[in-house]
Image: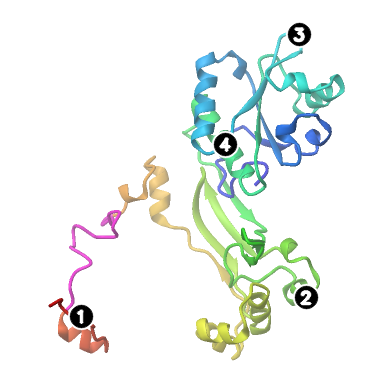
Amino acid sequence: MIKYGTDKPDLRNPLEIVDLTEFFSDVEFKAFQGRPVRGINVPGCAKQSKGWFEKMLKFALEIGMKGLGYIEVLEDGSYKGPIDKFLPPEKKEELRKIFDFKTDDTLFFICDTPKHVNDFAGQIRTELANRLDLIDKSKFELCFITDFPMFEKDDDGKLIFTHNPFSMPQGEMDALLNEDPLKIKAYQYDIVCNGVELSSGAVRNHRPDVMVKAFEMAGYSEETVKEKFGALYNAFHYGAPPHAGMAPGVDRMIMLLQDEENIREVIAFPMNSNAQDMLLGAPNTVTEMQLRETHIKLRRPVPEK
Protein backbone atom coordinates (compact mmCIF):
# COMPACT_ATOMS: atom_id res chain seq x y z
CA MET A 1 0.00 0.00 0.00
CA ILE A 2 2.91 2.36 0.65
CA LYS A 3 4.83 1.39 -2.51
CA TYR A 4 1.89 1.59 -4.93
CA GLY A 5 -0.94 3.27 -2.98
CA THR A 6 -3.35 0.44 -3.81
CA ASP A 7 -3.83 -3.30 -3.39
CA LYS A 8 -4.47 -3.52 -7.16
CA PRO A 9 -1.23 -2.06 -8.57
CA ASP A 10 -0.60 -1.56 -12.27
CA LEU A 11 3.00 -2.76 -12.52
CA ARG A 12 3.36 -1.31 -16.02
CA ASN A 13 3.68 2.02 -14.23
CA PRO A 14 7.41 2.44 -13.36
CA LEU A 15 6.80 5.07 -10.65
CA GLU A 16 7.05 4.00 -7.01
CA ILE A 17 5.99 5.70 -3.80
CA VAL A 18 8.44 6.22 -0.93
CA ASP A 19 7.48 6.79 2.71
CA LEU A 20 9.01 10.11 3.83
CA THR A 21 7.22 10.39 7.17
CA GLU A 22 10.38 9.85 9.23
CA PHE A 23 12.40 12.12 6.94
CA PHE A 24 10.08 15.06 7.66
CA SER A 25 9.75 14.33 11.38
CA ASP A 26 12.55 16.81 12.17
CA VAL A 27 11.88 19.30 9.36
CA GLU A 28 10.28 22.61 10.36
CA PHE A 29 7.41 22.45 7.89
CA LYS A 30 4.09 22.58 9.73
CA ALA A 31 2.00 21.18 6.88
CA PHE A 32 3.88 17.85 7.09
CA GLN A 33 4.45 17.56 10.83
CA GLY A 34 2.62 14.80 12.69
CA ARG A 35 1.15 13.29 9.54
CA PRO A 36 2.35 10.63 7.08
CA VAL A 37 4.18 11.90 4.01
CA ARG A 38 4.78 10.10 0.71
CA GLY A 39 7.10 11.02 -2.15
CA ILE A 40 7.07 10.14 -5.86
CA ASN A 41 10.15 10.95 -7.93
CA VAL A 42 9.43 11.45 -11.66
CA PRO A 43 12.53 11.48 -13.92
CA GLY A 44 12.63 14.35 -16.43
CA CYS A 45 9.34 15.82 -15.29
CA ALA A 46 10.79 19.31 -14.69
CA LYS A 47 10.78 19.82 -18.48
CA GLN A 48 6.99 20.03 -18.42
CA SER A 49 5.28 23.41 -18.77
CA LYS A 50 3.88 25.50 -15.95
CA GLY A 51 0.40 24.71 -17.23
CA TRP A 52 1.12 20.99 -16.91
CA PHE A 53 1.95 21.39 -13.21
CA GLU A 54 -1.16 23.52 -12.70
CA LYS A 55 -3.28 20.73 -14.16
CA MET A 56 -1.69 18.23 -11.75
CA LEU A 57 -2.51 20.56 -8.87
CA LYS A 58 -6.08 20.87 -10.10
CA PHE A 59 -6.37 17.08 -10.23
CA ALA A 60 -5.03 16.79 -6.66
CA LEU A 61 -7.62 19.26 -5.41
CA GLU A 62 -10.40 17.45 -7.28
CA ILE A 63 -9.66 14.14 -5.52
CA GLY A 64 -9.73 15.82 -2.10
CA MET A 65 -6.12 16.77 -1.43
CA LYS A 66 -5.25 20.15 0.11
CA GLY A 67 -2.44 20.69 -2.40
CA LEU A 68 0.45 19.02 -4.20
CA GLY A 69 3.95 20.13 -3.22
CA TYR A 70 7.04 19.35 -5.28
CA ILE A 71 10.69 20.23 -5.85
CA GLU A 72 12.60 20.18 -9.13
CA VAL A 73 16.25 19.20 -9.51
CA LEU A 74 18.27 21.83 -11.41
CA GLU A 75 21.35 21.24 -13.55
CA ASP A 76 23.74 22.34 -10.78
CA GLY A 77 22.14 19.86 -8.36
CA SER A 78 20.17 22.46 -6.40
CA TYR A 79 16.44 22.32 -5.89
CA LYS A 80 13.64 24.59 -7.01
CA GLY A 81 10.19 24.64 -5.44
CA PRO A 82 8.14 25.97 -2.52
CA ILE A 83 9.33 23.26 -0.10
CA ASP A 84 13.05 23.77 -0.86
CA LYS A 85 13.43 26.66 1.62
CA PHE A 86 12.33 24.43 4.52
CA LEU A 87 15.07 21.86 3.89
CA PRO A 88 18.46 22.45 5.55
CA PRO A 89 21.58 21.37 3.57
CA GLU A 90 21.94 18.02 5.36
CA LYS A 91 18.30 17.09 4.64
CA LYS A 92 18.72 18.04 0.99
CA GLU A 93 21.69 15.70 0.76
CA GLU A 94 19.73 12.93 2.50
CA LEU A 95 16.92 13.37 -0.01
CA ARG A 96 19.42 13.17 -2.87
CA LYS A 97 20.71 9.82 -1.60
CA ILE A 98 17.20 8.40 -1.13
CA PHE A 99 16.13 9.10 -4.72
CA ASP A 100 19.47 9.27 -6.59
CA PHE A 101 18.34 12.48 -8.27
CA LYS A 102 19.21 13.41 -11.84
CA THR A 103 18.82 16.78 -13.56
CA ASP A 104 15.15 17.65 -14.27
CA ASP A 105 13.79 15.08 -11.81
CA THR A 106 10.69 16.25 -9.94
CA LEU A 107 9.79 14.94 -6.51
CA PHE A 108 6.09 15.22 -5.64
CA PHE A 109 4.94 15.20 -2.01
CA ILE A 110 1.65 13.78 -0.75
CA CYS A 111 0.63 14.39 2.86
CA ASP A 112 -2.69 13.62 4.52
CA THR A 113 -4.27 11.55 7.28
CA PRO A 114 -3.23 7.89 7.72
CA LYS A 115 -6.64 6.88 6.35
CA HIS A 116 -6.26 8.78 3.05
CA VAL A 117 -2.56 9.29 2.33
CA ASN A 118 -1.93 5.97 0.54
CA ASP A 119 -5.04 6.30 -1.61
CA PHE A 120 -4.11 9.85 -2.63
CA ALA A 121 -0.52 8.83 -3.37
CA GLY A 122 -1.77 5.95 -5.50
CA GLN A 123 -4.06 8.22 -7.51
CA ILE A 124 -1.26 10.77 -8.04
CA ARG A 125 1.08 7.94 -9.16
CA THR A 126 -1.46 6.76 -11.73
CA GLU A 127 -2.26 10.27 -12.97
CA LEU A 128 1.44 11.13 -13.38
CA ALA A 129 2.04 7.98 -15.44
CA ASN A 130 -1.00 8.62 -17.63
CA ARG A 131 -0.17 12.28 -18.27
CA LEU A 132 3.46 11.44 -19.09
CA ASP A 133 2.56 8.36 -21.15
CA LEU A 134 4.77 6.08 -19.03
CA ILE A 135 2.58 2.97 -19.26
CA ASP A 136 3.39 0.40 -21.94
CA LYS A 137 -0.09 -0.66 -23.00
CA SER A 138 1.24 -3.58 -25.04
CA LYS A 139 2.24 -5.47 -21.87
CA PHE A 140 0.41 -7.61 -19.32
CA GLU A 141 1.96 -7.38 -15.85
CA LEU A 142 0.57 -9.84 -13.32
CA CYS A 143 1.15 -10.17 -9.61
CA PHE A 144 -0.22 -11.88 -6.52
CA ILE A 145 -1.18 -9.70 -3.57
CA THR A 146 -0.78 -11.62 -0.31
CA ASP A 147 -0.77 -11.16 3.48
CA PHE A 148 -3.86 -8.99 3.79
CA PRO A 149 -4.46 -7.76 7.35
CA MET A 150 -7.19 -9.71 9.14
CA PHE A 151 -8.53 -6.73 11.10
CA GLU A 152 -8.58 -2.94 10.99
CA LYS A 153 -10.27 -0.19 12.98
CA ASP A 154 -13.20 1.86 11.70
CA ASP A 155 -13.63 5.60 12.23
CA ASP A 156 -15.01 4.98 15.73
CA GLY A 157 -12.01 2.86 16.75
CA LYS A 158 -13.98 -0.41 16.60
CA LEU A 159 -12.18 -3.54 15.41
CA ILE A 160 -13.66 -4.81 12.13
CA PHE A 161 -12.73 -7.35 9.47
CA THR A 162 -10.58 -5.90 6.68
CA HIS A 163 -11.70 -8.20 3.88
CA ASN A 164 -13.14 -11.72 4.07
CA PRO A 165 -14.18 -12.63 7.64
CA PHE A 166 -14.26 -16.34 6.76
CA SER A 167 -10.54 -16.52 5.93
CA MET A 168 -8.12 -18.40 8.15
CA PRO A 169 -5.88 -16.06 10.16
CA GLN A 170 -2.19 -16.82 9.83
CA GLY A 171 -1.24 -18.49 13.10
CA GLU A 172 -4.85 -19.62 13.65
CA MET A 173 -6.02 -19.59 17.30
CA ASP A 174 -2.57 -18.80 18.71
CA ALA A 175 -2.46 -15.56 16.70
CA LEU A 176 -5.97 -14.54 17.80
CA LEU A 177 -5.12 -15.13 21.46
CA ASN A 178 -1.61 -13.70 21.63
CA GLU A 179 -0.97 -11.18 18.85
CA ASP A 180 -1.95 -7.55 18.37
CA PRO A 181 -5.15 -7.84 16.30
CA LEU A 182 -3.95 -5.15 13.89
CA LYS A 183 -0.81 -7.18 13.14
CA ILE A 184 -2.58 -10.47 12.38
CA LYS A 185 -2.44 -11.39 8.71
CA ALA A 186 -4.95 -13.56 6.88
CA TYR A 187 -4.39 -16.29 4.34
CA GLN A 188 -5.91 -14.15 1.60
CA TYR A 189 -4.63 -13.45 -1.89
CA ASP A 190 -5.63 -11.59 -5.05
CA ILE A 191 -4.32 -11.99 -8.57
CA VAL A 192 -3.99 -8.64 -10.34
CA CYS A 193 -3.20 -7.78 -13.96
CA ASN A 194 -2.56 -4.22 -15.16
CA GLY A 195 -4.33 -2.80 -12.12
CA VAL A 196 -7.41 -5.02 -12.54
CA GLU A 197 -8.31 -7.61 -9.91
CA LEU A 198 -8.88 -10.86 -11.79
CA SER A 199 -9.74 -12.90 -8.73
CA SER A 200 -9.75 -13.02 -4.94
CA GLY A 201 -9.05 -16.16 -2.99
CA ALA A 202 -8.30 -17.42 0.49
CA VAL A 203 -7.56 -20.34 2.71
CA ARG A 204 -10.94 -20.70 4.34
CA ASN A 205 -11.38 -20.89 8.07
CA HIS A 206 -12.60 -24.47 8.64
CA ARG A 207 -12.37 -24.54 12.46
CA PRO A 208 -15.47 -23.44 14.39
CA ASP A 209 -13.44 -22.40 17.45
CA VAL A 210 -11.24 -20.10 15.36
CA MET A 211 -14.30 -18.75 13.55
CA VAL A 212 -16.10 -17.92 16.80
CA LYS A 213 -13.01 -16.28 18.31
CA ALA A 214 -12.37 -14.15 15.19
CA PHE A 215 -15.96 -12.93 15.14
CA GLU A 216 -15.88 -12.33 18.90
CA MET A 217 -12.90 -9.97 18.39
CA ALA A 218 -14.96 -8.07 15.82
CA GLY A 219 -17.85 -7.69 18.26
CA TYR A 220 -20.08 -10.69 17.39
CA SER A 221 -21.25 -13.14 20.04
CA GLU A 222 -21.31 -16.89 19.36
CA GLU A 223 -25.11 -16.72 19.33
CA THR A 224 -24.98 -14.12 16.57
CA VAL A 225 -22.59 -16.31 14.57
CA LYS A 226 -24.98 -19.26 14.94
CA GLU A 227 -27.91 -17.12 13.86
CA LYS A 228 -26.32 -15.32 10.91
CA PHE A 229 -23.90 -17.98 9.66
CA GLY A 230 -25.59 -21.15 10.85
CA ALA A 231 -24.82 -23.16 7.72
CA LEU A 232 -21.07 -22.76 8.09
CA TYR A 233 -21.10 -22.97 11.86
CA ASN A 234 -22.98 -26.29 11.84
CA ALA A 235 -21.06 -27.77 8.91
CA PHE A 236 -17.70 -27.08 10.53
CA HIS A 237 -18.74 -29.09 13.60
CA TYR A 238 -18.96 -32.18 11.41
CA GLY A 239 -15.32 -31.80 10.46
CA ALA A 240 -14.38 -29.79 7.36
CA PRO A 241 -10.95 -30.38 5.78
CA PRO A 242 -8.61 -27.44 5.13
CA HIS A 243 -9.62 -25.89 1.82
CA ALA A 244 -8.65 -22.96 -0.38
CA GLY A 245 -9.07 -21.69 -3.91
CA MET A 246 -9.79 -18.91 -6.32
CA ALA A 247 -11.60 -18.47 -9.64
CA PRO A 248 -10.30 -15.82 -12.05
CA GLY A 249 -13.10 -14.30 -14.12
CA VAL A 250 -12.90 -15.02 -17.85
CA ASP A 251 -14.87 -11.85 -18.59
CA ARG A 252 -12.23 -9.72 -16.87
CA MET A 253 -9.48 -11.42 -18.88
CA ILE A 254 -11.37 -10.67 -22.10
CA MET A 255 -11.83 -7.06 -20.97
CA LEU A 256 -8.04 -6.73 -20.68
CA LEU A 257 -7.38 -8.50 -24.00
CA GLN A 258 -9.89 -6.20 -25.72
CA ASP A 259 -8.41 -3.12 -23.98
CA GLU A 260 -11.82 -2.16 -22.61
CA GLU A 261 -12.19 -0.13 -19.42
CA ASN A 262 -15.73 -1.29 -18.59
CA ILE A 263 -16.52 -4.97 -18.10
CA ARG A 264 -20.03 -4.42 -19.46
CA GLU A 265 -18.50 -4.02 -22.91
CA VAL A 266 -17.53 -7.72 -22.99
CA ILE A 267 -20.48 -9.32 -21.16
CA ALA A 268 -23.14 -10.91 -23.37
CA PHE A 269 -26.15 -9.54 -21.49
CA PRO A 270 -24.93 -6.65 -19.33
CA MET A 271 -27.22 -5.01 -16.82
CA ASN A 272 -27.68 -1.26 -16.73
CA SER A 273 -27.00 0.97 -13.73
CA ASN A 274 -30.39 -0.02 -12.26
CA ALA A 275 -29.47 -3.74 -12.40
CA GLN A 276 -31.91 -4.35 -15.25
CA ASP A 277 -31.26 -6.71 -18.17
CA MET A 278 -32.80 -4.72 -21.01
CA LEU A 279 -32.51 -7.56 -23.55
CA LEU A 280 -34.32 -10.16 -21.46
CA GLY A 281 -36.56 -7.68 -19.68
CA ALA A 282 -35.44 -8.73 -16.24
CA PRO A 283 -36.39 -8.31 -13.50
CA ASN A 284 -40.06 -8.76 -14.33
CA THR A 285 -43.29 -9.53 -12.51
CA VAL A 286 -43.95 -13.03 -11.13
CA THR A 287 -47.13 -15.05 -11.34
CA GLU A 288 -49.30 -16.04 -8.43
CA MET A 289 -48.38 -19.69 -9.07
CA GLN A 290 -44.64 -18.89 -8.80
CA LEU A 291 -45.24 -17.13 -5.50
CA ARG A 292 -47.17 -20.14 -4.14
CA GLU A 293 -44.41 -22.55 -5.18
CA THR A 294 -41.90 -20.59 -3.12
CA HIS A 295 -44.32 -19.94 -0.24
CA ILE A 296 -44.13 -16.17 -0.66
CA LYS A 297 -47.08 -13.95 0.07
CA LEU A 298 -47.07 -10.31 -1.00
CA ARG A 299 -48.45 -7.73 1.37
CA ARG A 300 -49.84 -5.20 -1.04
CA PRO A 301 -50.20 -1.57 0.11
CA VAL A 302 -53.70 -0.60 1.22
CA PRO A 303 -55.06 2.02 -1.20
CA GLU A 304 -55.69 5.42 0.33
CA LYS A 305 -59.30 6.42 0.72
Label total for image: 4
**Residue under circle 1?**
300
Depth check, mark 3 against mark 1: the one in front is: 1
Q: Quadrant of the C terminus?
A: bottom left
Q: Are marks 2 and 3 in contact (CB under 8 Å)?
A: no
Q: Are marks 4 and 3 in contact (CB under 8 Å)?
A: no
Using the numbered discs, state the Cα–Cα distance from disc 2 to disc 3 in whole angstroms: 57 Å
Task: Identify which amino acid the numbered label 2 is placed on.
Answer: Leu
Task: Identify which amino acid the numbered label 3 is placed on.
Answer: Asp
Q: Determine whether the residue tagged by mark 1 lies in a helix, strand or loop.
A: loop
Mark earlier in primary sequence (4, 2): 4
**Residue under circle 2?**
177
Does any portion of residue 37 appear in the rendered image?
yes
Using the numbered discs, state the Cα–Cα distance from disc 4 to disc 3 in whole angstroms: 32 Å
Residue positioned 78% across, 33% down in the render: 24
Mark earlier in primary sequence (1, 2): 2
Q: Determine whether the residue tagged by mark 3 lies in a helix, strand or loop.
A: loop
Mark earlier in primary sequence (2, 3): 3
**Residue under circle 4?**
65
Using the numbered discs, state the Cα–Cα distance from disc 3 to disc 1 in whole angstroms: 79 Å
Depth check, mark 4 against mark 2: the one in front is: 4
Q: Give the percent coordinates (x, y) of residue 161.
A: 61, 66
Using the numbered discs, state the Cα–Cα distance from disc 1 to disc 4 in whole angstroms: 49 Å
Residue positioned 62% across, 82% down in the render: 221
Q: Residues within 10 Å of mark 4 (few under 14, many from 20)?
A: some
Q: Residues within 10 Å of mark 1 (few under 14, many from 20)?
A: few
Q: Which mark is residue 76?
A: 3
- Viewed as shown, does residue 43 lie left or right of 253? right
Q: Give the percent coordinates (x, y) of residue 84.
A: 74, 19
Using the numbered discs, state the Cα–Cα distance from disc 4 to disc 2 in whole angstroms: 39 Å
* Nearest the eye: 304 or 41: 304
